[in-house]
Amino acid sequence: MNSWKERKKKLSTSLDYDPLTTIPMIEGGSDNLTVMQARIRNEFDRLDCKRITIIDQYFLPSDIDFIIHTFASLHGRKIRILTKLADPKNVEQKQTHESNFKEAIKQVEKKGIFSEFKIYKANIPIHDRYFISEDLSTNSPCLSLGTSINMLFQSYSCIIKIENNSFKRQVLKLADLCIQSGNEIREWEDGR
């Protein structure tokens, strides 16, 4: 009788397991970054998500590699990234980040990795970080990150899969507000 109760309890706790609602460092060290990238990639690929928005105020030019390794799996994918060009470690870095972003965008476009790749500097205060599919449907992926991409596996923080469609629509409205309030980084170079 006791073993059945234990088995039943174990089974019920494993039924709600979702690999995209996690604290990655509890599952393992930085060697699990590729595992986490694969989980994120599979979630967006499974539903053939072609348009993905990333919101991360501390997104750095070096984080573009993470985006490529995570989302370059489907041909024709469009990526837009919203950032504040803020560096949590060095506030003085904005100018360097701008020029590094411009160069990185050129390289991504030159290689044809994505059909569209845009980075916007938001001029409104943003804090939370998200990966969200703009192909909004009942099952479309939306992930909330407890830290910036560049801090994943460096601090104990969460990744939470959001299922509430009303909240997903709010995240997309936030993305639109960020774009309306800011500038596409390439525009500065083109003098627009």
Image: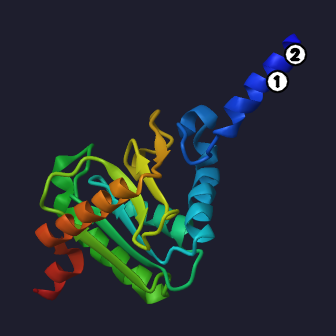
| Residue at (53, 36) in percent of width and height | 23
Q: Disc 1 vs disc 2: Cβ atoms closer than 8 Å?
A: yes
Is residue 28 visible in the rendered structure shown here?
no
- The C terminus appears in which quarter of the rendering? bottom left
Which type of secondary structure does the marked residue at label 2 adopt? helix
| Residue at (15, 52) in percent of width and height | 125
For residue 82, above or below residue 88: below
Is residue 156 visible in the rendered structure shown here?
yes
**Would you say 78 lies left or right of 175 here?**
right
Residue 153, position as x, y percentages in the image? 51, 41
- The N terminus appears in which quarter of the rendering? top right
For residue 169, above or below residue 185: above
Q: Amino acid at mark 2?
A: Ser
Colouring scheme applied when the structure was drawn: rainbow
**Would you say 67 lies left or right of 166 here?**
right
Residue lying at the far top in this picture: please name it: 2
Residue 189, position as x, y percentages in the image? 17, 82
Q: Which residue is mark 1?
A: 7
| Residue at (28, 76) in percent of width and height | 102
Which type of secondary structure does the marked residue at label 1 adopt? helix
Rendered image: mark on residue 180 = none
For residue 111, above or below residue 130: below
Residue 141, position as x, y percentages in the image? 49, 61
Rendered image: mark on residue 3 = 2
Q: Quadrant of residue 22?
A: top right
Residue 191, position as x, y percentages in the image? 10, 86
Q: Amino acid at mark 1?
A: Arg
| Residue at (47, 82) in percent of width and height | 114
